Amino acid sequence: MRIGPGPDQEEIRLKAWNVTEMDIERARPRVLDSEDEGRIIALRLPKGERLSEHQVHERAWLFVASGAIEIDDADGECVGGGAGLIAEFSPRERREVRATEDSILVLLLSPWPGEGHPRQRPAAASAQ
């Protein structure tokens, strides 16, 4: 959908996805969009599988589109929930995610890439 620009504005395009209808392969996250403001990723996590303890450089929001998950943070706190659950993580916050049912998850990272992300390092520094 296109929304016409106002004076001195760029044209805005609405982007929309129904991740519950997408063919998202196991262990193959699908990047839906990637802009400076953020990156949005859909992934399938089958029952009993997990995203091992990890962290990202960006602030992250994890949304359960279908299924159910449990999240353990670095302090041992556990939060669980099904479709509709949204969890927010600070940059570099460690967590582990387990699927208690076959699940489709949406991960939003902002900004993209976050401070300290390898993509932000100057090309000269990475060549050394």
Image (cartoon, rainbow, N blue to C red):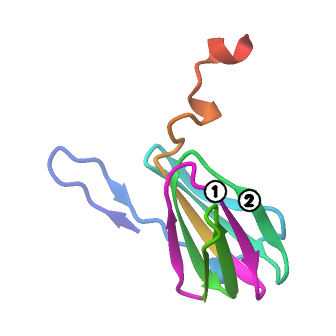
> Does residue 47 lie above or below 71 as drawn?
below
Q: Earlier in the sequence, mark 2 or mark 1?
A: 2
**Quarter-of-image position of residue 17:** bottom right
The quarter of the rendered structure image containing the N terminus is: bottom left
Question: Does the CB distance between marks 2 and 1 fall below 8 Å?
Answer: yes
| Along the line of sight, the residue nearer the viewer: 81 or 35 | 81
> Does residue 57 lie above or below 109 as drawn?
above
Disc ID at residue 53:
2
Horizontal and vertical percent position of residue 63: 56, 75
**Quarter-of-image position of residue 113:** top right
Residue under pointer 1: 94
Q: Is residue 98 magenta?
A: yes
Q: Residue at x 31, y 53 (%)?
A: 11
**Quarter-of-image position of residue 77:** bottom right
> Does residue 42 lie above or below 7 as drawn?
below
Question: What's the amino acid at mark 2?
Answer: Glu
Judge the density around disc 2: few (<14), some (14-19), many (≥20) Cα neighbours within 10 Å: some
Q: Residue at x 37, y 64 (%)?
A: 2
Does the image show residue 23? no
| Along the line of sight, the residue nearer the viewer: 9 or 17 | 17
- 13 lies left or right of 34: left
Question: What's the amino acid at mark 1?
Answer: Arg
- Magenta segment boundaries in residue numbering: 83-104
- 84 lies left or right of 119: left
